[in-house]
Image: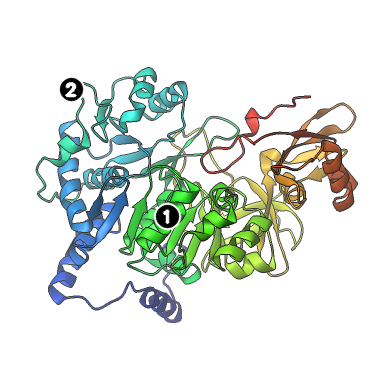
Amino acid sequence: MVPGVRLPLQTRAEMLAVLVRRGMVRPIRPDRLARAGVALHRWGPTLAGSFTVNAITRADQPALIDDHESVTYGEIESRTNAIARGLQANGLTAGDRLGILCRNEASFIETMVATSKVGADALLLNTSLSAPELGAVLRREQPKVLVHDGEFTDIVTEADAGPVARVVAENDGAGAGTPTLADLRGGDPSPLDPPPEEGRTVILTSGTTGAPKGAQVRRAENLEPLAWFLGRVPIDAGSVCLEPAPLYHAHGLGQTIIATGIGCTVVLPRRFDPLETLALIERHRVRVLTVVPTMLQRIMDLDPAERERYDTSTLRVVVCSGSALPGQLAHDFMDQFGDVLYNLYGSTEVAWATIATPRDLREAPGTVGRPPQHTRLEILDDDGRPRPAGETGHIFVGHEMLFEGYTDPSQSRRVVDGMMTPGDLGHVDEEGRLFVDSRVDDMIISGGENVYPGQVEEVLRTHPDVDDAVVMGVEDERFGQRLIAYVVPRPGSELTGETVIGFARDNLARFKVPREVHLRDELPRNALGKVLRRELRPTG
């Protein structure tokens, strides 16, 4: 949807029908409706606005359940008012930046809502950063206040971040004189006036091949993107949603914002554990689960008898994103849990661009699906010209949710005709379904032929003794580059590198066959499941 373009009546009617079907439009007491309307007018469609409206319409409903507590929408309203005033007392004002270094918990979301009420930017920090990496990010982004879990106190101290006021999210690990969120919650809970300017959310890119960049994500100006998303992914208002995907990443945060925006109850486990995930689904009657592919793999790696111990029959939607979802894994998961899997493709820079439904995943393994309504998807060559179906090119996405730019103005993304590239290469099939072939930086040119690692990896993973695989290129005097595969054998198998190469020769073109195969116990991955290619080196 292009900003400023008025929707046709038929399109607006379709959008309203989706919202009604998902339960967002429902009977409500006239006085509450009026108060909610006033709140939405004052705060706009911000994070502060959505929680304020839900505090009026769903005050007694649990909003967030973490490992320690359950908090209602009404309680969050009072708590975030007090936290916002406490942050202001620590020097935070509209236009400043606040860093959040926390695991999944109510404190994370409460801090974001309070920051929104102040009008400051929320900088979401990866909990896996080392002290030097954290220090580099904090010095570059210069937050005025840093809210962090107690377990990160030593890392924050070692980071040499410069002058920054610190608030510990929970009591554990707080040093003498360091305030905690519990302290701030005990302050004045009276409502605040909306800030003079709206804060932004800054998310760090994954940094799998280099230093992470700060990306300023764009907030939806209206309900249209939400309606088109819910038209493809059937999440009902008021559902219980389990969110083990990390909140500091666009996928986990985005699904949590959608869930709380439509009045769901969100369960936030501090860490992911496959058995505990199944237990939480049974305990809370979960209908929606947000994951990254490695989480699905860990669930499927459980002994079938262990999986069968838990009642997961309430599960209706599993939203997966963050890294490549192998086609066989999607099939295996749906065979076990039903056709409930939805695969999203996008990036921090372009938001979600395509959605693969269970039917797409059954019919076209490995696909990331089709773009929703009012999202433009094009495959372009190096000169910006469209590529036909089946041919690989640069993926470009156009809609109103493209990010606002990096915090470092020297960094940018290529834009063509109002569309932005997430930096991936891919192709579409005759049905318009997108397949991601590789990152632009990962494409290998061997003997003059373009090789897309994703295509080779997908084939190698179909071998019954291959648990995981990644393909890279290294310099070669004869061919320019040669292919190397890093393969994780399935437990108990007798897989060899020669077996893998023979399988590749039987199933791939000659120039796509790896010249070397290195067997590994595991591949280095970040919390989203993306392979950290910079940590892979030939081992001989």
Provide the secondary structure element on which disc 1 rests: helix
Q: Relative to 497, is 237 above or below?
A: below
Q: Is residue 396 visible?
A: yes
| Rendering coords of residue 313 (x, y %) | 46, 68
Q: Relative to 308, is 277 above or below?
A: above
Q: Can residue 370 be seen in this view?
A: no
Q: Which of marks 2 and 1 is in front?
A: 1
Q: Relative to 528, is 209 above or below?
A: above
- Mark 2 belongs to which amino acid? Gly
The image's colouring method is rainbow
* Distance from Cα at disc 2 to Cα at disc 1: 39 Å
Residue under pointer 2:
177
Provide the secondary structure element on which disc 2 rests: loop
| Rendering coords of residue 540 (x, y %) | 79, 24
| Rendering coords of residue 32 (x, y %) | 15, 70
Residue under pointer 1:
279
- Mark 1 belongs to which amino acid? Ala
Residues tagged 2 and 1 counted as in contact (Cβ below 8 A):
no
Left/right of residue 62 with respect to residue 243 in the rendered view? left
Left/right of residue 55 with respect to residue 299 in the rendered view? left
Dividing the picture into quarters, in which one does residue 82 lie?
top left
| Rendering coords of residue 37 (x, y %) | 20, 67
Left/right of residue 380 with respect to residue 112 in the rendered view? right
